[in-house]
Image (spheres, rainbow, N blue to C red):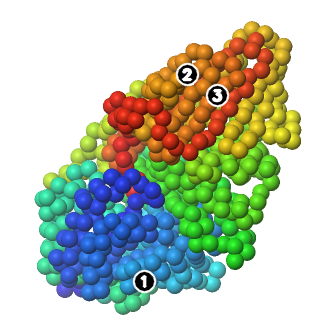
Amino acid sequence: MASPVSLLFGVHAHQPVGNFPEVLADAHARCYRPFLQVLHRYPDFCFAMHISGWLLDYLIGHYPADMDLLHKMVLRGQVELFGAGDTEPVLAAIPNRDRIGQIQTFSDKLELKLEQRPRGAWLTERVWETSVVPALVDCDIRYVIVDDYHFLCAGKSTVELQGYFTTEEDGRKLDLFPISEALRYRLPFSPAHEVVAYIEALAENSHDHAGSAAIYFDDIEKFGIWPETYQWVYEKAWLDDFIQRVLSSPRIRTQHYRDYHAATKTRGIVYLPATSYIEMNEWTLPASVANAYADLVHQARVSGWYESRKAFLRGGIWKNFFSRYPESNWMHKRMLGLSARLGTLPEPQRTAAMTQKLYESQANDAYWHGLFGGLYLPHLRRGVYKAMVELEGMLDVRVPRPSHFLEDTDLDGIEELYLQNGVIQAILKLDGTGSICELDSYLLNHNFGDTLRRQAEHYYRKIQQGEYGSGGAGSGGIASAHDRAGLKHEISASDMEVDDHPRGMFIDCFKGQFVNYQLRDTDQGAHFAAGVLALHVDKRIRLSDARLTVSYVFAGEKEGMFGTEINVAMPSSDGWGGRYIYQGEIPGGFGHYLELPGLTDIILDDDALPGGIVLKTSAPVGLRAQPYHSVSQSEGGFEKIMQGVVITLEWPVATGELVISMEIRPGTRHGNDDPDAGNPDGTGIEPKSGS
C-alpha cells in the first residue's frame, strides 16, 4: 500500500494598509474569526498561516480574543507561521535593503507577538524573481511557496511536483514548494468528498511512496469573503466536513511545511523564470494584447491541448504594471526615490517612524490591477501617498531640498519640475501641457493630484459583448470568483471611453485645441509660454505658503473662450463627507454635476482630510464640476469607481490677465452640518477587501 500523502495546507490573510474599518470588520466576522474557531476544534489538523503585518497588528488591537485563539494554536503546535515583508510588498519591486528590513521586521513581530519565528515565507502575489533569494536567505528564511505554474515554465511536469526543489542565487540556496493549481481551484469550491478523493488519489498515483505532498497555500478570504463562500464554508459546514474527512483518511496525513522540509530531501535544483500565478499573465498585459492572449488560451482549451502546454503560453510579468499604468509607475519611482533618500540619511537621524512610513508606501495593493489589486481604488492609492508625503516631510526637516529642481523621476524621458516650500509641493510634468501631476500638502499628508486616467482594459470586451453572469460550479459546488463576472453598476459605452490626455491639473484649451507650452524659466516658480492659433499665452505657476497660484496673460487674439481643466482627488469622492461650498451654501457633493456662471470663489471641503481647497479667481469665470468614474473589475463583478472631481474653468481671452489660486486649508466644518447635505443619497464607493 502506498505511503500516506502529506497534506501541506496553508492560508494567507491580508488586507491593504489603511483599508476601510467596515471592510476589516466584515472580513473578520465572515472569515477570520469563523475560520480560526473551526480549526481550533481540530487540534490534530496541522496548517500553516500567513497574516500580513499590518493586518496582524489590526486584529491584535481590535480582536484580541481571536488572536489569543491563534496564539494558543501556535503554542500547541497546530500552526506554522509564515513570514514575508511586513506591509506585504512585492519583494522584487523594492530595493534589497528594504527587502531585508521588511522581512526582519515581520519575523521579529511574529516572534514577539505569537512566539514563533518563521522558517518559511509567503511571496506576495507569488511574484518570483531570483533577485529576492539573497534577502530571504539572509533573513534566515529557508523555503518559500510559489505556484506549480512557475515550475511548469521551467520545464517540470505536474507529476514531479509533489515535494520541494532547491534554487540558488549569489551563493545562497533556497528551497521552493510548488502550490498545486488543481487544489487551489478545488478548495473550497468543490464538495469536500471530491477534494479529499483527489488528495487520496495523489498517494495512489505517486511515483515517490516515501515523501509525496499535496501542497496548498492560498487566500483565506476564499473561506468566507468571496461570493457565496460564507454560507458554503460555514453555514453548510464545508470546512468541518473537509477537515473530518482528511483526519479520518488513512491515506492522508496533515503535516507542517517545516516538518516535511526537515524529513525529506530536495527533488533537485531548479531555476524559475520571472513570473507569478497564471491569471496574472493576462492582467499585466495592455488590453489589445491581453485580448489576443485570452483568445489563444481559449483556442487552446477548445482544442484540448491547453493543460499540457499552458506553460508555453506565457503572458506578461508583474512589473509590467509599471509600464501599463503611468500612475503606478509614478508612485513606484517616487517611493524608490524616498527609499534612496532614507538609505543615505546618517543613522542617528533616522527614526522608526520614517522606516514605517517607507514600508507603508511599499504595500503592493495600490500598484497593480487585475481581478484583485487596488490601483483603481482611490483609498488604497491615498494610503501610499499619505505615507510618502509624510515621509518626505520628515526627510526635508533633516536634509532640506531646493525650492525647485528638475529630474526625470519616472524614467519616461520627460523631466519633471519640482516646486516646494515645505508647506506644499507642486510637481509639473514638462510634456508640453504646463500642468501639475502631483500637488502635495505636508499638513494634510495628501496628494490632491492623485487621479487615474481612463485607459482601455481587457475586460471591457466582456462588458461590451455581455459576457457576464455566474460561472457554473459543477459537481454540486460553488463558482470561484475567477469564474464569475457580474455587473455591480449600470455601465454605458461612455463610461469606457479612453482619455485622450493625462488627468492633471491646469490642462489648458483654446477653441478646442490643447495648448502646447514651452518652459521659459524657473526663477520664481514656473514660467511657460505658448502660441495657439493667433493667441499668445504667458502662464506662471507659483507657491506661497499653502497657496498655489496660476496666472494667465493673453496677447494677440481678442475673441474666444479659454479653458483649463483641473482634476482633483478628494478623499470622500461621492460619499457624504465631501461637498462644494458656494456663497455660504452647499450646492452639491463631489458626486454631483455643478455649473456656476460668474464665479470668483468656491470651497471644496472634505471631512476625510479633514480640510479642503479654497479656489479663487481674479475675475469672474464659468465653472463646470463633475465626478470622473472609471470602470473596474473585482471579485464581486464589474463596477464604476469615482476617481476624482473634474473642474473646468472658462473665461474670455479679452479678460487680458486672470489669476487662479488654490489655497489648501486644514479642516473646519462650513455651512450646513448635515452629513448627507453634500450627497442626498449618502452613497459612496462600496468598500472592498482589496485582497
Camera-side mark, 3 or 1: 3
Q: Write the residue at 42% across / 83% down.
A: 111
Q: Residue furthest top?
A: 559
* Residue 686 spot, x, y in % from top left: 36, 43
- How much space separates mark 2 and mark 3, taking CA atoms? 14 Å
- How much space separates mark 3 and mark 1, taking CA atoms? 55 Å
Q: Which residue is mark 1?
A: 111
Q: Vertical placement of 15 versus 615: above or below?
A: below
Residues at discs 3 and 1 in contact (Cβ within 8 Å): no
State which quadrant residue 31 falls in.
Answer: bottom left
Mark 2 element type: strand
What's the amino acid at mark 1? Glu
Q: Is residue 331 visible?
A: no
What's the amino acid at mark 2? Arg
Mark 3 element type: strand
* In-front residue for pair 347/373: 347
* Residue 285 spot, x, y in % from top left: 53, 47
**Quarter that holds the C terminus:** bottom left
Q: Vertical placement of 1 versus 66: above or below?
A: below
What's the amino acid at mark 3? Lys
State which quadrant residue 318 falls in.
Answer: bottom right
**Quarter that holds the N terminus:** bottom left
Q: Which residue is mark 2?
A: 624
**Of the numbered discs in the image, which one, if any, rests on residue 282?**
none
**How many circles with numbers are drawn on the protein?**
3
State which quadrant residue 541 falls in.
Answer: top right
Answer left or right for 19 relative to 518.
Answer: left
